[in-house]
Image (cartoon, grey):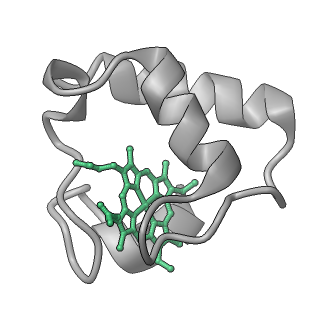
Amino acid sequence: MSNCASCHGGNLQGATGPGLQQIGAKMNKEQILQILENGKGSMPAQSHISADERDQLATWLTEKK
Ligand code: HEC
């Protein structure tokens, strides 16, 4: 998460990127995985994170609602 925190805030409250505290209410796991794999707008693809870790992150974020 430390990498995400630089743009999304240490508590997911948002910074240069949008807040993710209720992202699970807005997006499902597949949509979050897509963003991690491909990036979105000015968010770069998070391809330095292993597929396993992206999967875990997406599951964790899906529970944020
Ligand atoms: C370099 C800055 C940066 C980093 C690092 C970054 N993001 Fe982002 N992220 C953004 C920006 C900017 C957006 C908004 C993109 C848009 O909608 O155009 C975004 C959007 C998102 C969204 C969609 C939010 C929404 O409401 O549409 C998710 C989910 C997300 N990021 C997750 C992550 C995760 C998880 C990580 C760490 C693995 C991460 N991001 C790392 C900048 C970043």
Residue 63 shown left or right of residue 65 in the figure: right
Where does the image place residue 14, in percent across and percent down from the top left? 19, 67
Taking the spot 83% from the left edge, 33% from the top edge, the residue there is 51
Write down the quadrant of residue 3 in the picture: bottom right
Q: Is residue 44 left or right of residue 37?
A: left
Q: Is residue 47 above or below residue 6?
A: above
**Quadrant location, the C terminus:** top left
Q: Quadrant of ligand 1?
A: bottom left
Q: Residue at x 84, y 60 (%)?
A: 48
Q: How many marks?
A: 0
Residue at figure coordinates x 47%, y 60% from the top left = 40
Q: Position of residue 17 (x, y in %)?
A: 29, 72
Q: Position of residue 28 (x, y in %)?
A: 36, 16
Q: Position of residue 54 (x, y in %)?
A: 68, 35
Q: Is residue 31 left or right of residue 13?
A: right
- Tell whether 56 sits left or right of 8: right
Splitting the image into 4 quarters, where does residue 12 fall? bottom left
Q: Residue at x 79, y 51 (%)?
A: 49
Q: Quadrant of residue 16?
A: bottom left
Give the camera-side residue of 61 and 37.
37
4 to 64, vertically: above or below = below
Q: Nearer the viewer, residue 35 or 12?
A: 35
